[in-house]
Image: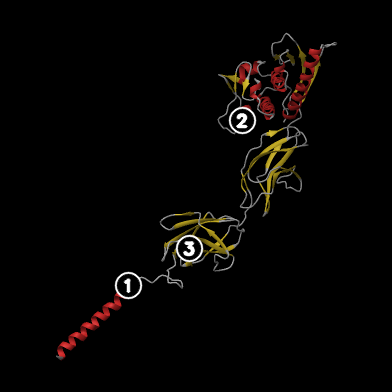
C-alpha cells in the first residue's frame, strides 16, 4: 500500500511540472482595455525621403488585437511620447498585410520630432515605440554651370539654371556683375521676376563695349545669398552699320506706305546688327516695285519690292547678311560652305551653344544658310531669332568674313 501511494505521489509531481512548463510557452496576453478587448500591436517605424519640411513614414500593424482595426497612422510632437491629441496623421496608404505609410509635411527645418505609431480598434488606441526624426538643414542653393554666349556691345544675357533650393524657399534670384572677379549683389544686380528653382534667362544692360566683365548667378533662401560660378566675359565692339534710304522726291500713297514699313525694318535691323555684331557697313535701302521679293549684294545695295510680306525686320536682316558677305562673295562659296555644311569653328560652336547641341552644324548653299539665317518668315518664332542671327554673323566674321563687313576687333 505504501509503495502504490509513492507512485501516485510521483505521478502527480510529474503532471504538475509538465503543466507549468506548458504555460511558460504560451504567448503574452495582448494589452486589454477595461472592457477586456485586446488592443492592436504595432511594429517599429521607418523613415525615408527626409527633407527640411517632412518625411515619408512607414509603419506596421502586427496584430489586430481583439477587434477590427479602424484607424492607423502616426502622431508627432516636439516633446516625447506624443498622442493623437497632438498631431495625428492617419495613414493614406495601407495594405492587408498591416503595412501603412504617412507623408509628413509642414515640419520645420533642423528640428527634432518624436513620432509614434498608433492604431485604433473597438477596444481603444494602442501606441508603438516612439522614434526620433530630425528634419534636414537648409543648404545653399545649387546652380548648374552653364556657358554664356549672348554677348553684345552694351547688353548681354545669361541662362541661369537653379538645380535645387537647398531645401528652403528661393525668394529672389538673378545675376550680379562687375569688372572684378566674384561680384556680389552689393554691386550691379538684375533680379528675375519669378522665384523658385529652374531655368530662366536674364539680361544685363548699360555695359561698356570691349570691356572685360565677371558675372555670377545668385539666389536667396533662408540661409542667405548663394552664388554660382564666376563667369568671365568680354563685350564686343559696337557695330557701325549705317544706311541711306533712297526715296522718291514725290512719293505716291503706295510708296509712302512701303517707306513706313521699311523704315521700321531698317531701324530695327540696324539696332540688332550694331548691338550684337561689330560689323562696319553702309547699306543703301531702295524700294523697287519691279523686284519680286528682295535682294542685296556685298557692296551694300538692298532692294525691296511691293510684296508687303517681305517689308519686315526678318527680311531686312536677311538681306543685310548678304551685304556682310553670306551668299555674295567668293569667301562664302569657296571656303565657308562645302558639301552643304559650314566649315569654320566659330560659327558652328556658336550654333552648338544656341541649340544646346554639341552635334549642331550650320547648313548652307551658294546663297543661304540655316538655321537662324532668316530665309523665310516662318523661321521667326520670337525676337531671339534676330539675336541668334546676329550672333552667328559675328561668329562668321571671326572665321574670316571680315573683309566684307569691316575688320574684326575683339
Disc 3 crowd, CA 10 A, few/some/many (<14, 14-19, 20+): many
The earlier-in-sequence mark between 3 and 2 is: 3
Task: Identify the residue shown where x is 80% and y is 17%.
Answer: 245
State the CA–CA distance, disc 3 to disc 2. 64 Å
Q: Quadrant of the C terminus?
A: top right
Rendered location of residue 301, percent (x, y): 75, 14
- Residue furthest to the top in view is 290
Q: How many marks?
A: 3
What residue did someone put label 1 on?
25
The earlier-in-sequence mark between 1 and 3 is: 1
Q: Quadrant of the N terminus?
A: bottom left
Q: Secondary structure at mark 3?
A: strand
Residue 56 is marked as: none
Q: Is residue 113 visible?
A: no
- Residue furthest to the bottom in view is 2
What residue did someone put label 2 on?
349
Residue 119 is marked as: 3
Rendered location of residue 160, percent (x, y): 65, 41
Colouring of the image = secondary structure
Choose top left, top right, bottom left or bottom right for residue 111: bottom right
Closer to the camera: disc 3 or disc 2? 3
Q: Secondary structure at mark 2?
A: helix
Q: Do residues under tags 2 and 1 come within 8 Å of each other at their CB atoms?
A: no
The earlier-in-sequence mark between 2 and 1 is: 1
Position of 268 with respect to 84 (left or right) is right
Rendered location of residue 147, percent (x, y): 64, 38
Q: Secondary structure at mark 1?
A: loop
Disc 2 crowd, CA 10 A, few/some/many (<14, 14-19, 20+): some
Q: Is residue 69 visible?
A: yes
Task: Work out whether residue 141 or residue 154 is closer to the camera in this orientation and state it.
Answer: 141
Amino acid at each position: 500500500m505504501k509503495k502504490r501511494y509513492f507512485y501516485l505521489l510521483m505521478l502527480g509531481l510529474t503532471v504538475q511540472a509538465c503543466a507549468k512548463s506548458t504555460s511558460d510557452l504560451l504567448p503574452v496576453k495582448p494589452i486589454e482595455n477595461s472592457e477586456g478587448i485586446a488592443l492592436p500591436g504595432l511594429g517599429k517605424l521607418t523613415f525615408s525621403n527626409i527633407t527640411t519640411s517632412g518625411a515619408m513614414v512607414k509603419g506596421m500593424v502586427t496584430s489586430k488585437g481583439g477587434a477590427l482595426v479602424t484607424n492607423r497612422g502616426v502622431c508627432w510632437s516636439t516633446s516625447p511620447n506624443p498622442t493623437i491629441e497632438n498631431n495625428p496623421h492617419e495613414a493614406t496608404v495601407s495594405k492587408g498585410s498591416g503595412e501603412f505609410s504617412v507623408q509628413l509635411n509642414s515640419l520645420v527645418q533642423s528640428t527634432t520630432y518624436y513620432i509614434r505609431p498608433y492604431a485604433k480598434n473597438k477596444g481603444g488606441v494602442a501606441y508603438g515605440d516612439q522614434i526620433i526624426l530630425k528634419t534636414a538643414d537648409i543648404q545653399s542653393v545649387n546652380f548648374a554651370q552653364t556657358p554664356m554666349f549672348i554677348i553684345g556691345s552694351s547688353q548681354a544675357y545669361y541662362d541661369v539654371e537653379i538645380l535645387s533650393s537647398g531645401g528652403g524657399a528661393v525668394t529672389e534670384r538673378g545675376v550680379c556683375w562687375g569688372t572684378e572677379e566674384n561680384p556680389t549683389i552689393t554691386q550691379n544686380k538684375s533680379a528675375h521676376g519669378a522665384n523658385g528653382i529652374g531655368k530662366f534667362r536674364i539680361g544685363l544692360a548699360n555695359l561698356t563695349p570691349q570691356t572685360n566683365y565677371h558675372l555670377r548667378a545668385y539666389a536667396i533662401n533662408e540661409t542667405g545669398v548663394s552664388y554660382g560660378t564666376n563667369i568671365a566675359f568680354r563685350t564686343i565692339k559696337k557695330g557701325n552699320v549705317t544706311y541711306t534710304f533712297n526715296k522718291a522726291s514725290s512719293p505716291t500713297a503706295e510708296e509712302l506706305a512701303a517707306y513706313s514699313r521699311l523704315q521700321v525694318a531698317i531701324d530695327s535691323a540696324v539696332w540688332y546688327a550694331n548691338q550684337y555684331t561689330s560689323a562696319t557697313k553702309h547699306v543703301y535701302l531702295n524700294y523697287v516695285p519691279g523686284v519680286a521679293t528682295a535682294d542685296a549684294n556685298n557692296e551694300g545695295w538692298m532692294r525691296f519690292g511691293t510684296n508687303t510680306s517681305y517689308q519686315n525686320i526678318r527680311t531686312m536682316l536677311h538681306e543685310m547678311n548678304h551685304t556682310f558677305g553670306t551668299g555674295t562673295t567668293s569667301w562664302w562659296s569657296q571656303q565657308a560652305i562645302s558639301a552643304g555644311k559650314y566649315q569654320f569653328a566659330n560659327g558652328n560652336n556658336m550654333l552648338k551653344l544656341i541649340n544646346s547641341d554639341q552635334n549642331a552644324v550650320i547648313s548652307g548653299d551658294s546663297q543661304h544658310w540655316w538655321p537662324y539665317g532668316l530665309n523665310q518668315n516662318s523661321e521667326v518664332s520670337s525676337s531671339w531669332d534676330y539675336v541668334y542671327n546676329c550672333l552667328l554673323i559675328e561668329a562668321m566674321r571671326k572665321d574670316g568674313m571680315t573683309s566684307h563687313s569691316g575688320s574684326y576687333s575683339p
